[in-house]
Image (spheres, grey):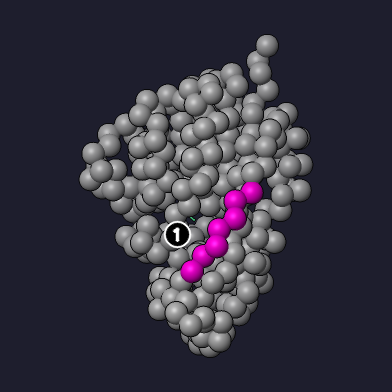
């Protein structure tokens, strides 16, 4: 309970700057849109939608889409609503609820998405809930990083204690086992690789903003010391243009509910 409250406070605090301090990947959105084009997608939900950076991309690329934007955080949903309205998009409905209390209508959706949020959820319960809501041949898309992928990131490599603190991420094997046990079908696991470049200033700005919730798990003094070491570590990695370069990797699980016939 204390952990859940801590996370809720964290997301309330970061909501205003969240989109600016995270790196948004367009490649998984292109992939999702291509997959959904085959069957059409008019109604979907994004669970743990945050401040709406992926929702805007989905809504722009799928002009027929109506999207339920679901999140526990009132602050995130406020910033999502502003963001989508400013972009002239109104085909969305913000829904403020925790995933445990979420009751999606049976057979009502073509797709359910979750980006960078599955490690905050009970995975089997999420799949059960989402698959019940899917229409025949509907799909669930889970974009996340595994513990191994986390270890390769600039944070995993150079921020002291980052990997020990982050114990919530699910391994690919664990997720596969849960999907199979649910009676759904894991139809694809797509890996995305990105070569990232960032200045030291940008990385420090992200860390100060606690852009990954992992960074909110440090005590104040512990964080200050880790941040100093991180700065030294990344300074030593800078190339001649003062940038740090590394490869990030993420994974997209594509899950189909069993056809009902
Ligand atoms: C890491 S953020 C990702 C936000 C967004 N998907 C993105 O990639 O920008 C995780 C989001 O999940 C939400 N969240 C965490 N636990 C939740 C829960 N149990 N029920 C609903 N939303 C939750 C948080 O409020 C936060 O907005």
Please tell me which residue lies in front, 224 or 28.
28
Specify the quadrant of the image occupied by residue 1: bottom right
Left or right, residue 16 beside residue 46 = left
Can residue 107 be seen by looking at this rendering? yes
Q: In this view, does 231 lie above or below 50?
A: below
Is 220 located above or below residue 258 in the figure?
below
Q: Residue at image x 39%, y 42%?
A: 57
Using the rendered image of the protein, determine whether residue 72 is visible from the camera's viewpoint.
no
Q: How far across and down, in percent of the image, does residue 203 sit?
A: 45, 74
Quarter of image, res 188:
top right
How far across and how far down the image is residue 86, in percent? 23, 45
Residue located beneath label 1 in the image? 23
Secondary structure under tag 1 reads loop
In this picture, residue 63 sits left or right of residue 1: left
Is disc 1 surrounded by few (<14), some (14 to 19) or many (20+) residues within 10 Å?
few
Boundaries of the magenta span: 191-197
């Amino acid at each position: 309970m204390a952990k859940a409250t801590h996370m809720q406070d964290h997301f309330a605090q970061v909501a205003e700057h969240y989109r600016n301090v995270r790196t948004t990947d367009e490649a998984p959105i292109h992939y999702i849109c291509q997959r959904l084009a085959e069957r059409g997608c008019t109604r979907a939900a994004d669970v743990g939608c945050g401040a709406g950076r992926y929702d805007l991309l989905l809504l722009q690329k799928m002009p027929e889409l109506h999207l339920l934007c679901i999140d526990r955080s009132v602050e995130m949903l406020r910033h999502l609503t502003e963001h989508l309205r400013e972009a002239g998009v109104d085909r969305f409905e913000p829904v403020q609820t925790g995933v445990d209390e979420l009751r999606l209508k049976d057979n009502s959706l073509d797709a359910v998405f979750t980006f960078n949020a599955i490690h905050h959820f009970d995975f089997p319960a999420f799949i059960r809930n989402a698959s019940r809501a899917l229409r025949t041949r509907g799909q669930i898309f889970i974009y996340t990083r595994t513990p191994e992928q986390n270890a390769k990131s600039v944070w995993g490599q150079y921020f002291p204690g980052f990997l020990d603190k982050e114990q919530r991420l699910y391994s690919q094997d664990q997720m596969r086992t849960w999907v199979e046990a649910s009676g759904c079908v894991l139809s694809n696991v797509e890996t995305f690789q990105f070569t990232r470049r960032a200045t030291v200033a940008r990385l420090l700005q992200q860390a100060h903003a606690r852009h990954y919730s992992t960074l909110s798990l440090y005590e104040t003094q512990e964080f200050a010391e880790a941040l100093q070491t991180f700065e030294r570590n990344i300074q030593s990695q800078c190339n001649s243009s003062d940038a740090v370069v590394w490869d990030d990797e993420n994974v997209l699980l594509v899950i189909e509910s069993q056809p009902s016939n």
